[in-house]
Image: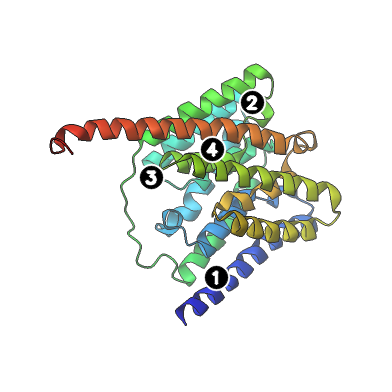
Amino acid sequence: MDSAVSKKVTMISYTIAISFIVAMIAASVLLRNHEIILPEIAAMAIAMWVYREAGWIRQPSKIFIAPTVTAGIGLMINQLQIAYVGKVILTLMLMMLFLRIIRSNLAPSIATGLLPLVINTHEWSFVMIVFIFTIILMIGVLAFGLNKGLEKKVSIQYKYMLIFLALTFFWIGLCWVAGYQQIAVIPPILVVVYESVQKPMYNGKMAFKQGLVLTLSAAIGTLLYFTMDSWVLTALLDMILMLALSLIVGIRIPAIYAFPLLSFIFPEENVMNLPLGTLVTCLFMFTCVLLYKKYEMKRTGKSKAPSSPIGV
């Protein structure tokens, strides 16, 4: 009986979340403003309303505070007359500092902060759009009590922020040298990388699945974008296919729901390169995360060895 109820609740949750995402696309079409499309909002809706991701909903007020402020940071940095790479690096540093100050680990804030740079917006209405959508997400969490029973305060290991920055800066540097700086920053991937670095356990199978579903989601989103005329129907089909993909592969990554929406907001010349760019980025980033986590586990094992009984 409990299982049946659980499945029913899950189906309803998916329906509400996907309807919310499609409504966002519809609003963009009606108002003729593509800045209303926020890919990370799709990921947040699924993670918070369907998966009930504890790390994202344990502090409801941060659901709108963190993404809104980081969006403001990204928008302010984008006003500066400096190179794109410089804007990205400065934005990432300020975002990590802000998250450290408010003691939050809300990964989607990274995506909302980078989006103004990616779509090159200078309008402050963008921040208001982020605020409105994240407020709605927070209201949903509170209205249905999705955060009940969760510990509000958790220990955050801030060293992972530095590791994430170092890894991301290295990747951006490689892309800049190779002349592909415009695809160096794919927000959903960075969100997954940020969370993966902090996982206590991480292995090759997990890295492979992450890279696989993210690349497939980018490919599916790009294909549908170029083959269908209606953005609303495209978004609806995208979300249904992402749900099917997650069930087939057997992994829950909210970011795959954000990926198809990137096609709607990325510069036209970058959309065609999105699947390949995603593949290459995933190969590099998740391989680096895997190598680091193996090193970390090996080092941790060595540090604990002296306290273990002899012969064990």
Say whether disc 4 or disc 2 marks the residue closer to the N-terminus: 4
Element marked by disc 4? helix
Give, as a three-letter code, the residue at label 3: Ile
In the displayed structure, 252 sits above or below 163; it is below
Residue 257 visible (yes or no) = yes
Q: Label 3, on which residue?
A: 102
Q: Which mark is residue 10?
A: 1
Q: Quadrant of residue 121?
A: top right
Give, as a three-letter code, the residue at label 1: Thr
Foreground label between 4 and 2? 2
Q: Residues within 10 Å of mark 1 (few under 14, many from 20)?
A: some
Question: Answer yes or no: do the residues labelled 2 and 3 have beta carbons within 8 Å?
Answer: no
Q: Residues within 10 Å of mark 4 (few under 14, many from 20)?
A: many
Foreground label between 2 and 1? 1
Measured in 3D between alpha carbons, the distance from the residue under mark 1 to the one under mark 4, in whole angstroms, is 35 Å
Query: Where's residue 247, x and y in %?
Result: 60, 59
